[in-house]
Amino acid sequence: MNLNISEKIAKTVVWIASLGMFGVLTSIVAFILFKGLPAISWSFLTQMPEKMGREGGIASPIAGTFLVTVPAVLIAMPFGIGTAFYLAEYTKGGIITRAVRFSAESLAGIPSIVYGLFGFIFFVVKLNLGWSILSGSLTLAIMILPTIIRTSEVAISSVPKTYKEVSYSLGATKWQTIRLTVIPSAVRGIAIGVILAIGRCVSETAALILTAGSVLGMPDSLLSSGRTMAVHFYLLATEGISPERAFGTAALLIITVFFINVVANTLIERLFKRVGR
Amino acid sequence: MFLIFALTSISVLAVITGFIFMQGFPLIADVGLRDFLFGTTWEPTRGQFGIGAMIAGSLAVTFGAALIGIPVGICCSIFMAEFAPGIVRKIFRPAIQLLAGIPSVVYGFWGIMFVVPFIRNYFGGPGLSILAGSIVLGIMMLPTIISISEVAIVSLSHTYKEGALALGMTHWQTILAVQLPAAKSGIVAGVILGLGRALGETMAVIMILGNATALPESILSPVRTLTANIGLEMGYATGVHRQALFATGIVLFIIIMLLNIIAQHLTNRGDMIE
């Protein structure tokens, strides 16, 4: 075959595959938003669900999402960021570093259902926390650890060396240098990791069903069972309870993820601008 | 102090592994490894624990997803890295990022609304099937494959491309003969992570695979995956049944860890080349 023709065919295939993929993926989002946005109203967001979610709003799943996510992120942050500092600043590439890195990367690949199994046997059964917001949070904290470690490590190691050298030359100790120089410069990059971790918590379902249960009422403490928006959506959708409310919840989830990404991207862009300067 | 945090982070992997193995291992020892892995009867109430059909289900769906996800994903990453005009790239990149963040239950729901009825109407069978699962998982693994492979292609040194073009190769020949082979380890790592995502997916497959515990007869049969088995039954399982679900988790864990190790090995090798 003529070289030019086969080349054109190849390029056409690539274009079609890409635009097709883009079309399918946007149609998924468009479909959910189209069906779901009309269902979202002030009362939908603020009212309690009634009759298993058949009527009313999604106030308690929104609260549940918040109550599961915030402690998970707060718990994972010191461990994740601390580990990242260790990897980026203190280590000289020995066996411990290799073990930490191997473990972080492996944790990143473990499916959420396996975290769910672990959370169930460890937090729910062994520590006797029961199916609760707290068990769910602790499980998610472990699940998001690798995300935070990886992004923070990149952020910390991309702090210009000159910053640190100037600090040392002024007589600062290692810890002073980290606290006064490295942390302020890396804080945005670390924030990106934390934001991505929030996104993972918001969209998680499998691990939470096994650890936080799916009680629909408003949780009155961290030890009561509760469901997040993603779990609520799953139950509404699979049990055919209320398609309208299922779409509304899904649309709200997509909007939340979208905002999380926008915030992360804005931070990333600013980061690049600053590094470029 | 940082060392303490770091050590805690490593020990997490050890603790997870320890607990899951501890819970599941007694059952595997009782049933016998061969009967557990290759037995095809799963009837917890009668003490029959064979996960052969589910291993087959997981592999079949992941393989189907790979057939769709890998070629499309690599095409898209070539497109993003080489052909897409600046403005298209500016739209695609955040879109792919958004798609990676959408909860898997939403993809599952889309599968129930569109893919399952489509297959039921045009191909027959219940619709809830390996085919439906492969399509949805194939789409779900795209963002992972595209973003990692694109980075692998873009981060190649310019000299590769310039050298090839200077030798008189066309743009497409350069991509095929020089850039893709050079970016191979990064692309394969992306593909493996995508496969890991498909294999580990739980909620979406529960929604669209039909969850039958029998061996599938064709790609139009419903199946149950290892993940679905855990997700579906963990809520009410007790005693030996619960142990059997943990044992299912062990098998899943081992498969995923193997994939992880291969991916890490490839990424490290890629770093060394640079």
Image (tube, helix red, strand yellow):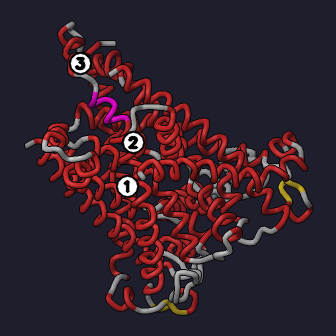
Q: Quadrant of residue A38?
A: bottom left
Q: Residue A49 in the image: state x and y as whole percent.
A: 49, 89
The kind of residue on which mark 1 rests is Leu
Span of residues in magenta? B149-155
**Residue B209: percent from left, percent from top:** 64, 56
Chain letter of disc 1 in the image:
B
Query: Which residue is tagged 3?
Result: B161
Mark 3 element type: helix
Q: CA distance from mark 2 to mark 1?
A: 30 Å
Could one spot residue B252 in this view of the protein? yes
Q: Closer to the observer: label 3 or label 2?
A: 2
Q: Amino acid at mark 3?
A: Lys
Q: Residue at x 75, y 57 (%)?
A: B245
- Left or right position of B268 against A258: right
Residue topped by disc 2: A87
User: Which amino acid type is shown beneath numbered disc 2?
Assistant: Leu
Residue at image position (72%, 43%) is B56
Q: Which mark is residue B147?
A: none
Query: Farthest left residue?
Result: A277
Instruction: Determine the image quadrant of residue A81.
Output: bottom left
Report whether mark 1 lies on the same chain as mark 3. Answer: yes
Residue at the spot 76% in from the left edge and 56% down from the top edge: B23
Left-right relation of B206 to B270: right
The secondary structure that most of the magenta stretch takes on is helix
- How far across and how far down the image is residue B75, in percent? 36, 34
Q: Position of residue B39 (x, y in %)?
A: 85, 45
